[in-house]
Structures are given as structure tokens and as C-alpha cells.
Amino acid sequence: MGSGVIHAGHFFTISQDGIAECLDLKDGKTVWRHRLEGTGGTGSSWSSMLLAGDKVYVPNQSGDVFVLRAGPKFDLLATNSIGEPTNASLAASDGQLFLRSDTALWCFGARHE
């Protein structure tokens, strides 16, 4: 349902069922495929991926946010949970990430004073 991202000759995407995939742009072949398992009961994702540097961020419907290295080897760097359901995609601005849950707007990043 969401959009994927392109980085360094690879296309990264996630299925509605929560399966992340990396495809080679030259031949379209699958480089890796992995189910993202979070802390919540709903592993499905309706969100678009967000590319920042060499990292891909993607939330699932349970409010888990996965951080993957954007590369030809599957590398899950972190899983963080907001503990609330979400169907939204992340947005980035000025070094911060924003995520809308069913009840709140979350901001992640260094505090600006």
C-alpha cells in the first residue's frame, strides 16, 4: 500500500503483510526478503518507507518503527515502538522524524531550544 525507496542500485519496499524486500534495480531479482517482527500484534504495514542517509525507516500498524540499513544485506538496526496503532508514514524535517498515531503526533530527534 505504501511506496518504496531507491538507494545505491536497490529498490526497498514492504508488503501490506509486513514483509520487507530489497530488489536489484538492474535485473529486478530479489536480493533479500524478510518479515519485520515487532512488539505488537499487527505486523502489517500500510506506510511508505522513508530513506534518510543509508537508513530506511518504516512503521507497522502496531506502532513499531523499524530502522534498516539500505543495503544488499538485510540489517535490522533498531525496532522502536510508540505503543499505539498507526497507519501513517513517517515525515522528516530538520533532523527530526514525525509520526501520527491514532491518538497523537509524535516527534523524534534532538530537542531544539
Image: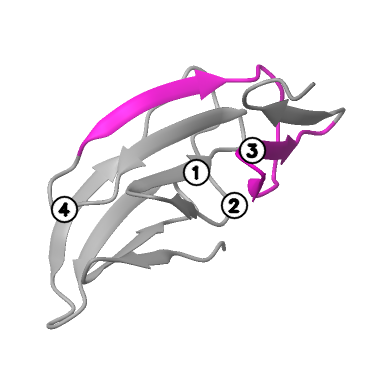
Residues under labels 4 and 3: Cα distance? 26 Å
Highlighted magenta segment, given as a residue range: 75-102
Q: Position of residue 71 (x, y in %)?
A: 20, 52
Instruction: Report whether residue 18 is seen.
Output: no
Q: Give the mark nearer the N terminus: 4 vs 1.
A: 4
Q: 72 or 36, which is in the foreground?
A: 72
Q: Which residue is mark 1?
A: 58
Q: Secondary structure at mark 1?
A: strand
Q: Position of residue 51 (x, y in %)?
A: 45, 54
Amino acid type indicated by mark 1 = Val
Q: Give the mark nearer the N terminus: 2 vs 4.
A: 4
Q: Which residue is mark 2?
A: 47
Amino acid type indicated by mark 3 = Leu
Instruction: Confirm or deny contact between disc 1 and disc 2 (CB under 8 A).
Output: yes
Residue drawn at point x = 85 percent, y = 28 percent: 104
Q: Which residue is mark 4?
A: 32
Q: 67 or 31, which is in the foreground?
A: 67
> Residue farthest to the bottom?
26
| Left or right: 6, with 8 as reference point | right
Residues under labels 4 and 1: Cα distance? 16 Å
Q: Secondary structure at mark 3?
A: strand
**Residue count near mark 1 (Cα–Cα under 10 Å), binned few <14, some 14–19, many ≥20:** many
